[in-house]
Image (tube, grey):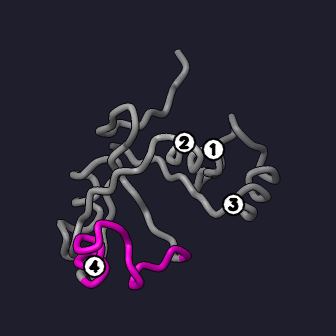
């Protein structure tokens, strides 16, 4: 039997819901605007999780510095799929790449995928 990695998330035909931890300034601004504002840095690496409880665990239940506020973010599924197409695993997977291929792909991408045990 082939092992498959799956994403378990809340979704509908149009959107998938992911969760992300932010500091209070970014979170309050995003809630007020219903989009990210000037305090959000699009170039900063960030991790999204499809599981609210897993993100709560990873943010130490909202107590880690700059991770005090957890937001639910709905992303168009077509855009989420585009992001996944660009993603490179954070650890080499011998079924996808040789070591050199993985290093090259990892260096050239801006999207990283880390499979969590959840």
Marks 4 and 2: in contact by CB < 8 Å?
no
Q: Separation of disc 3 and disc 4 at Cα?
A: 29 Å
Badge 1: how crowded within 10 Å, few (<14), some, or many (20+)? few
Please tell me which residue is depicted at 51% across the width and 25% down the height of the picture: 3
Residue range (magenta):
25-43
At which x and y percent is residue 16?
A: 37, 43
Quadrant of the image occupied by residue 95: top right
- Which label's residue is closer to the chain start, 2 or 3? 2
Residue at the limit of the structure toward the front, as seen here: 33
Give the label on residue 34, or none: none
At which x and y percent is residue 81?
A: 54, 42
Badge 3: how crowded within 10 Å, few (<14), some, or many (20+)? few
Q: Nearer the viewer, mark 2 or mark 3?
A: 2
- Residue position marked by numbered label 2 in the rendering: 81
Give the label on residue 85, or none: 1
Vertical comparison of 8 with 84: above or below: above
Q: Separation of disc 1 and disc 2 at Cα?
A: 6 Å
Vertical comparison of 91 with 61: above or below: above
């Amino acid at each position: 039997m082939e092992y498959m990695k799956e994403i378990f998330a809340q979704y509908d035909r149009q959107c998938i819901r992911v969760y992300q931890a932010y500091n209070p300034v970014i979170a309050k601004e995003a809630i007020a605007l219903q989009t990210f504002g000037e305090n959000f840095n699009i170039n900063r690496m960030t991790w999204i999780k499809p599981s609210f409880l897993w993100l709560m665990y990873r943010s130490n239940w909202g107590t880690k510095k700059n991770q005090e506020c957890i937001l639910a973010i709905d992303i168009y599924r077509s855009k989420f799929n585009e992001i996944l197409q660009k993603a490179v695993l954070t650890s080499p997977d011998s079924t996808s790449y040789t070591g050199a291929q993985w290093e090259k792909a990892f260096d050239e991408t801006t999207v990283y995928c880390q499979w969590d045990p959840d």
